[in-house]
Amino acid sequence: MSWRPQPNDRFYRVIVRTGLALRGLFRIRVIVTGQEHLPPPHGPSRSSSRGSSRPVSPGTGAVVAITHFGYLDFAFAELLLWRHARAQMRFLVTQGAADHWFAGPAISAAGHVVVGYESGAHAYDAAVEKLRAGEYIAILPEAGVSRSFRVRECKTGAARMAAEAGVPVIPVSVWGAHRLMTRRHGFSPARAWRAPVRIHVGEPVVVDPSRDAAAATEELRATLQSGIDACIADFPLKPAPGAWWMPAELGGGAPTDEERQRLDEAEGPRRAGGRRR
């Protein structure tokens, strides 16, 4: 049977074109390493952003775990996967976002997975089903922006989903996108103009169903942080002393991990992003 585009394929391509247009408008330079760790492309040609999205088939899914230092990290990871394999990523999003008058219709049209107010069990099951079918499910395992700009404690949802569906976790570390927009630092055209964004794709984490999810999650966190370290090491923009966008341990003005933990605790618990352990 020949492959047919999914119903939301056209809408997703509109999102991609918009992102590419904005990147081009501000001449943002994206530097990627570790692309050999991405799943091999399947199906349609990758030569044009106008091409149809990758066909899904059982056994080809993956969980894409993305660092979360700013509000645009996910977008750069999304464009990376599209350019590599015309992959439509399905994000786990909150019910609050899905209920928004503007974002809600877009979330529905793009086929994202909504985590309900009361429980994430339905979203978890839906995500596992999509993974088994061959979809890419994107997760921000830190479940919130890390204001220290170090990878903070991660939720176990990514590891548990991957183990249950029998797919790998692809770690994607994004550095520099937080300079464009993050907590207490809104979007600035001046900062965005010709800004560098560094992405490193880590070696896939394969989670055996018999393995402890917490241990696998800690391995994922370490891999994500290793990717961030690699991005910082050759980042083409030299920070000024005390730069707000650099970690405290590297001479930056961001909160230390201890300060970040106190601030996180003051805000209350994060969403689990799936069923709790």
Image (tube, rainbow, N blue to C red):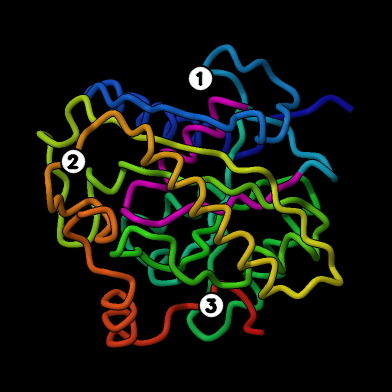
Q: Quick check: 67 left or right of 205?
A: left
| Closer-to-camera residue (30/186) | 30
Q: Which quarter of the rendered picture does the C terminus lie within?
A: bottom right
Q: Is residue 182 above or below residue 268?
A: above
Residue 112 lies, in percent from the top left, at 55, 55
Front-most of residues 104 and 149: 149
**SS for callout 1:** loop
Q: CA distance from mark 3 to mark 1?
A: 34 Å
Q: Which residue is mark 1?
A: 49
Above or below, 201 against 84 in this view is: below
Sequence order check, earlier mark of 3 and 2: 2
Magenta stretch? 61-84
State which mark lies toward you, 2 or 1.
2
Q: Is residue 64 magenta?
A: yes
Which residue is at a point 21% across and 35% down the rendered structure image?
238
- Which dot marks residue 272? 3
Measured Cα–Cα span from mark 2 to mark 1: 34 Å
